[in-house]
Every structure is written in structure tokens, then in C-alpha cells.
Amino acid sequence: MNNAEKRKFKRFPVLYHLIKPVLIRTRGSKAGISSPAIMANLSAGGMALLTFSPLAVGKNILISFDLKDLKIDNVKSKVVRCENKEGSYILGVQFLNLKKELADVINKMADDFDSCETRILLGEIPVCRYGCSYFEHCQRIAKGHY
């Protein structure tokens, strides 16, 4: 079984169109240690991050980020993967206590992104649909108005 088959939630790439900073806090002191990261993809179950410091698999962390219409603040998470990529690291992070309302927003964004990909592959015009929750984040050439 490959990783795609193990996933419970659809993911959508973030680096594909926008680079968003993420703050990682680890519990190592009273105030915690904060490190910046860049979001690579996002799903209701977790995310992939690009960092310049490794974190141990199994380490519990707090994740915070702010997209235009989605704010995540101190969500308990766990590092499930850490891959060295020539001086930087790709972290796989699993959310442990994401609120259902936020998970629903992320799932809708992933579904809308996936539907957009399908319309582009099929050559449908217009590509964009009214009510698309990914619209504010999209930077595609094919992006148009409804």
C-alpha cells in the first residue's frame, strides 16, 4: 500500500501557487522553541512542511498558520516523517486535535482544488466555479471569473 492509499483526507499543494509560513513550537522549555517552516501541502489530517532543522519522528509540536480565510493557532500535532533534502527537511505532520469546523473548511478546499484540476484536464471553460473555497488562494493562469 502506498502513501496515497493510506491517506484518509485529500491533500492540495500549497507551494504550487503560494508559499505560506508556518510556525512550529516544540515543548522543550517553558516558552517553547519556535521555528519557521514553509507549508508544502495541506489536508484535514495534516500537512507537509519544509524546514531547515530536523525534528524527530514522534515528536509532539504545536502548529500555527494563517491563510486568507483559514487560521490555525497552536494545533497539537505530531511529526510522522522527517526526510533530509540536501540541507533542508520535509516534515510530515499529523494534526491531533483539529476542530471539525476547520477540518471541514480544509476538506472543501481540497475538493474544490481537485475539481478544478479535473476541469482543466477536461478543457472545460470557464474553469472556476461560483463558491470555490480555493479561489482566493489560486494563482493559475486558467483562473477566471465565474
Image (tube, helix red, strand yellow):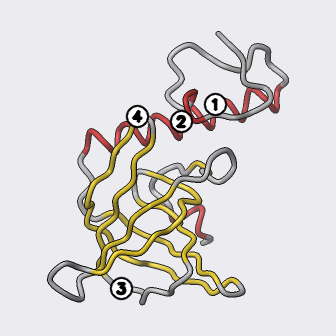
Q: CA distance from mark 4 to mark 3?
A: 30 Å
Q: CA distance from mark 4 to mark 1?
A: 19 Å
Task: Identify the residue position indicated by label 1 in the image.
Answer: 115
- Three-letter residue code for mark 3: Gly
Quarter containing the N terminus: bottom right
**Residue 107, picture quadrant:** top left
Task: Identify the residue position indicated by label 3 in the image.
Answer: 58
**Mark number, residue 69:** 4
Which residue corresponds to the image point at 37% horizontal and 70% vertical from the top-left? 24
Q: Earlier in the sequence, mark 4 or mark 3?
A: 3
Instruction: Classify residue 97 as left or right of residue 53.
Output: left
**Mark number, residue 111:** 2
Q: Earlier in the sequence, mark 4 or mark 2?
A: 4
Q: Tell which tag, 4 or 3, sits nearer the viewer.
A: 4
Q: Work out whether residue 130 or residue 87 is closer to the camera in this orientation and state it.
A: 87
- Three-letter residue code for mark 4: Asp
Q: Earlier in the sequence, mark 3 or mark 1?
A: 3
Name the outermost residue toward the top: 146
Do the numbered discs 4 and 1 sit on residues whose CB atoms are within 8 Å? no
Q: Tell which tag, 3 or 1, sits nearer the viewer.
A: 3
Instruction: Classify residue 52 as left or right of residue 97.
Output: right
Q: Tell which tag, 4 or 2, sits nearer the viewer.
A: 4
Where disc 3 sits, the SS reads loop
- Three-letter residue code for mark 1: Ser
- Three-letter residue code for mark 2: Asp
Depicted 99 relative to depicted 61: above or below: above
Q: Residues within 10 Å of mark 1 (few under 14, many from 20)?
A: some
Residue 23: image x %, image y %? 39, 65
Q: CA distance from mark 1 to mark 2?
A: 6 Å
Instruction: Classify residue 29 as left or right of residue 115.
Output: left
Name the outermost residue toward the left: 30
Q: Earlier in the sequence, mark 2 or mark 3?
A: 3
